[in-house]
Image (cartoon, rainbow, N blue to C red):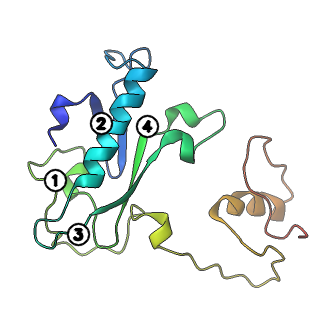
Amino acid sequence: MNWAKTSAYAVGFNSVYLNLAGREGKGIVDPGDGAKLLKAKIIDTLLSLRDPKSGAAPIKRVYRREELFSGPCAAAAPDLVIGFAPGYRTSWQTAIGGAPPKILEDNLKRWSGDHITDADSVPGIFLCNRTVPALTPAVKDIAPTVLDCFGLARPAEMEGKSLFDPV
């Protein structure tokens, strides 16, 4: 994919920001139908990528902002978030703002994880020294739980609930 030919202005670790008119200083993409169509095109292109060595799909899923973010700060979130298949990630160059010539390249550096693998591929483990009545704890419950433990009020827009709330 030639990113210069799309209207994406930033591609990072696993995020894509569109060059939206009205949001960006030199935005050219209509934030309505134009953005919707461009997102669909980028998603289709990313999901069609294949590893030339194995034929495997390096990208498991691409999320639209509205699928992941809500609340007063959602507008600052990326337009698209890429969920990589296990064993795949963006290049080290993209992590520091670069745009390498190859979309896929071997990762020859040691790394322990950078949170870009699709969440469905990485089930979490929750360890706690207290009884947790919640049957299905989720990441969105961690912040409300911490606030609860310190006796602090939760902002109204915060999703999730304390893991210690009765079921």
Residue 95 visible? The answer is: no
Q: Residue at x 29, y 73 (%)?
A: 87
Mark 1: give few (<14), some (14-19) or many (20+) Cα within 10 Å.
Answer: few
Compute the Cα span from label 3 to label 1: 14 Å
Residue 155: horizontal and vertical position, in percent? Answer: 78, 43
Residue 53: horizontal and vertical position, in percent? Answer: 10, 71
Tag 1 or tag 2, which sits nearer the N-term? 2
Instruction: Specify the amino acid type for callout 2.
Output: Ala
Residue 66 visible? The answer is: yes
Residue 13: horizontal and vertical position, in percent? Answer: 32, 52
Query: In the displayed structure, does residue 153 sit left or right of residue 158?
Result: right
Residue that label 2 marks? 10
Describe the element under mark 2 as helix, strand or loop: strand
Which label lies toward us, 4 or 3? 3
Describe the element under mark 1 as helix, strand or loop: loop
The disc placed on residue 146 is none
Q: Quadrant of residue 16?
A: top left
For the N terminus, the image quarter is top left
Compute the Cα span from label 2 to label 3: 26 Å
Residue that label 3 marks? 56
